Image: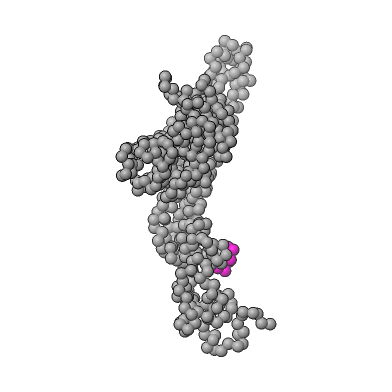
Amino acid sequence: MEVPGKLDLGALSAENLTLVCLPCDNDGLKEPAYGFCQDCQEHLCETCFKHHRRPRPMRNHVLIDKEFMPKTQVNAPTASEDTADFCKKHQDKPLEFYCRDHTSVACYVCVTLEHKQCRVDYIPDVSGNLSDEMTVILEQMESLITKCKSNIEYVSKAAQNLDLSHAKVVEDIKVFRKEINECLDRIGTSILKEADTIVKIAKCKQETVKAACLEINEELECSRSLLSSLKEQNKQNKFFIEMKNAEKCLPILTDKEKNVLHANTANDCIQFTCNASIIDFLKTEKSYGTLSTFVQPCQDRAIELQYIETIDMKLNSEKEKSNITGLVMIAPTKMVVSDNSNEKNIKLIDVEKKEVVTEVKMSSMPLDVITFPEKKLAVTLKGETFVQILSYSDAKLSLDQRIDVREKCNGVAYSQDKLVVTCQISKKIIIINLEGDILNVLGSPAIFYGPMRVFISKDETFIYVSDRDWRQNSKFLKIDWKGNC
């Protein structure tokens, strides 16, 4: 039975069979050549010829019709050692393209069906220009490996400190125990068990950190070794794919390292403090003592600040010096600052190039600026009773909605789809959602003199407020979400 659109092989002459469509030939079909792609160096049948330039990667390919196409068959290139991997969805199709929008590699079929509007690169065209990107990724990998090794060394020392301090606690308990005779056996046993439990839990957390870091290190070492091997063998396509896989894994492994440390924070020392009055009040006292935990000071954990450079944020057209009242990083090399002198601007700064990328003039002097999800900024303005929202990109700032606070604003912070706004004049903190609904009002003259800047704790449990008292020294308050100090 004839299949419409397919070639009847019996009707072909020897001359017609000479030139066939290479893509169809790879699928086991013998279709006569209708034209030729100069970029792909392939003969194409009528169907492939007409659809060849539809996918974005092939839109600029040069097609030659039947009259002027090469009259000899161009064979498919032989596979080299740098042959790309094959697509998981279409297992007979090689991974030849990289989608920058989805940060993923794809075959010809995937590009045609799923990435028509994307920015797609042909891997052989870009795989040879990766030295800078490779350097950045390898530096990030090296940095994470160093952190993990440091964590492993730290928890190993911490375990030793726990053993030593625990031994001292036990000895202190025994010495104190001799002074108060056998009547303290019951509560002495209780506190020894408490000490053992603290050490057990702390060691368990440290072992968890150690195991996780060893696992991360093993994965990174394996990936780094593979990348180095592929680079040395000049297998650029495989190197590109493995590098992109490593690039995807790096943030995941970085978050894993941070999360395991955060979830398994443990003190490495315990200390026994005896109750000195227990001898006099032995018959009535029920407390044998207390156990306190702390992290022993360690030079490796110290944070040192060092001056690097100064960035001038003043534009040539501005007469006055910049007066920066707030700043926030929106990318590793991009910073947004509020400048309440000059033209009352919000400026986007390229930290690497040390220059102002763009600016937006505000209705009054900007006081504070923060970032929150979906590439948004929140800005408070002097004398204004609203928070101005801006949208940003790598090279652009634009005004967005205004959120009415009903009070003159000063500082602003963000947490879980809520803005926390300080109102210095009315001595309040207002918690408001992004739709403008006031959720809570905290504070009173008895608590605040003049709340200015506001910050949210890392675990989002507490609110920190800088409070300015013109008569006395300013103070820094820590309150919960109900306003309790």
Q: Residue furthest right?
A: 1
Residue beneath the point at 41% across and 59% down: 130
- Asked whether the viewer can see residue 439, the reply is yes
Pinpoint residue 336: horizontal percent, then vertical percent: 42, 42
Q: Is residue 38 left or right of residue 199?
A: left
Residue 482 or residue 187, whichever sits in front: 482
Residue 432, above or below 185: below
Residue beneath the point at 58% across and 19% down: 288
| Structure colour scheme | one colour
Pinpoint residue 389: horizontal percent, then vertical percent: 49, 41
| Highlighted magenta segment, given as a residue range | 88-94
* Total tally of numbered discs in the picture: 0
Dominant secondary-structure state across the stretch colored magenta: loop
Point out the image quarter for the N terminus: bottom right
Q: Does the magenta segment cover residue 32?
A: no
Pinpoint residue 348: horizontal percent, then vertical percent: 40, 45
Residue 109 or residue 84, whichever sits in front: 109
Residue beneath the point at 43% across and 31% down: 297
